[in-house]
Amino acid sequence: MPSGLFTDLYELTMAHSYFRRGLNQPATFAYFVRAPVPHRRFLLFAGLDPLLSALQNFRFAEEDLAYLDSLDLFSQDFLDFLGRLRFTGEVWAMAEGEVCFPGEPLLLVTAPRIEAQLVETLVLNILNYETLVASKAARILLAAGPEAMVVDFSPRRDHSPEAALHAARASFLAGFHATSNTLAGKLYGIPVAGTMAHSYVLSFPDELSAFRAFAEDHPQPVLLIDTYDPLEGARNAVRVAQELQAKGKRIVGVRLDSGDLAALSREVRRILDEAGFPEIRIFVSGDLDEYRILEFRERGGVAWGYGVGTRLGVSWDLPALGGVYKLVEDEKGPRMKTSPGKITLPGRCQVWRREGFRDLVALDEEAGEGQPLLRRVMAGGERLLPPLNLPQRREEVRQTLFSLPPELADLRPHANPSYPVQISPGIAAQLASTGLKL
């Protein structure tokens, strides 16, 4: 769990100044993603559950305070204050897995100003990355279709072990079926899946010997058939399947990881079917994402499942999400940033979801129409909800994704997409009073 030191230095220097000047009244900060987000017609909000746990455990240990003291930047009374500090605020947020859009608040934090300021880095780090990966995973699922199995193969290319855990969690929340990351399986209850590597095949005198050994040692073998010649690999898989059949065992599937996946998959399917093994499944991998899966399917590729790694964990076509955390209200009332291109909405707001995923952002005191998406999830620094039931929420998210309107489910690249988000008359009036418009 990150310590209180997991924050940018300027958060601490600002907090020190707030402390010295008595500026610690309640303040509200909003987390939202700046619009537009290239190539994304919607986002999938993720990371709330890990964030709430981190906020509940937010504190500075003795060694943290000793390090801060060594910087010669902070007074002793401020360090003593940090030693007693706990997050005591209130959090309102959308549900994890909610379809959402840039330009609308996804989370609100109200707390004494110093607390709200110090948790900014934590909020942005967790929510930006999990939302980024969950949104990418959602697009990959839409490309693969509701019947396909999709597995997270990303940990070896993710940017850290911790990132790999968040990627496994976010992709499962979005609807993936499993992960190759066994630690994520243990921590989050995600099904784990895997096949074999080319190194295994190369460790035996020949491919057939490798297949026989693996099929004998694994209860549900999936054979990697492209170490040498993929079509000969398919024929070797058939030989092993025939041998196992006589023993009452079976091969679950074969995996293709290189070459012209669409053309090879069709040929492999033909070889398996002609040999009398239509039940052996074809699993494909190899730098896949939504664009490559769509192309694979459009070219007649045949696959029961997909392993998606690098392009998921680093969100290849959009490697960072422009999520920000801005002050929107304090003891003086609504606050608003007015710099060109970075205008923020003033005041505490609610997001109202109307039919067809049309959202209205309104001030708290304004009457809304539809379903309110922001709900209180933390008060007094304590969670109000039990830990997320990840498998159950995954099923709900999958149902939502596969029922999206066509204009949102469209995966074609678009550099400057528009979003079905409107602002209320109250917000519009506040903007007009400043002479600004979004």
Image: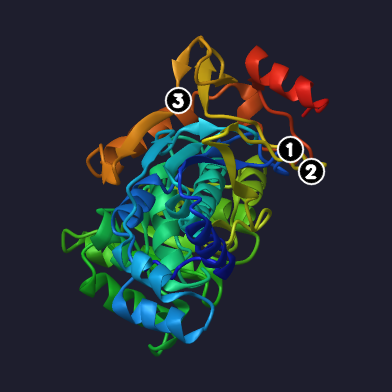
| Residue nearest the viewer, comparing 131 with 85 | 85
Front: mark 3 or 2: 2
Q: Residue at x 40, y 45 (%)?
A: 48
Q: Quadrant of the N terminus?
A: bottom left
Q: Earlier in the sequence, mark 3 or mark 1?
A: 1
Q: Position of residue 102 (x, y in %)?
A: 63, 36
- Secondary structure type for disc 3: loop
- Secondary structure type for disc 2: loop
Determine which residue is flagged by label 1: 343
Query: Answer yes or no: do the residues labelled 1 and 2 have beta carbons within 8 Å?
Result: yes
- Secondary structure type for disc 1: loop
Residue 332 falls left or right of residue 291 = left
Residue type at the position of mark 3: Leu
Q: Is residue 308 visible?
A: no
Residue type at the position of mark 2: Ser
Front: mark 3 or 1: 1
- Identity of the residue furthest to the left in this view: 248
As measured in the structure, the alpha-carbon distance from the residue carrying label 3 to the one carrying label 1 is 22 Å
Determine which residue is flagged by label 3: 373
Q: Position of residue 67 (x, y in %)?
A: 42, 83
Q: Residue at x 28, y 55 (%)?
A: 188
Q: Residue at x 45, y 62 (%)?
A: 153
Q: Quadrant of residue 423?
A: top right
Q: Residue at x 46, y 49 (%)?
A: 24
Is the residue marked by circle 1 packed among few (<14), some (14-19), or many (20+) residues within 10 Å?
some
167 lies above or below 412 = below
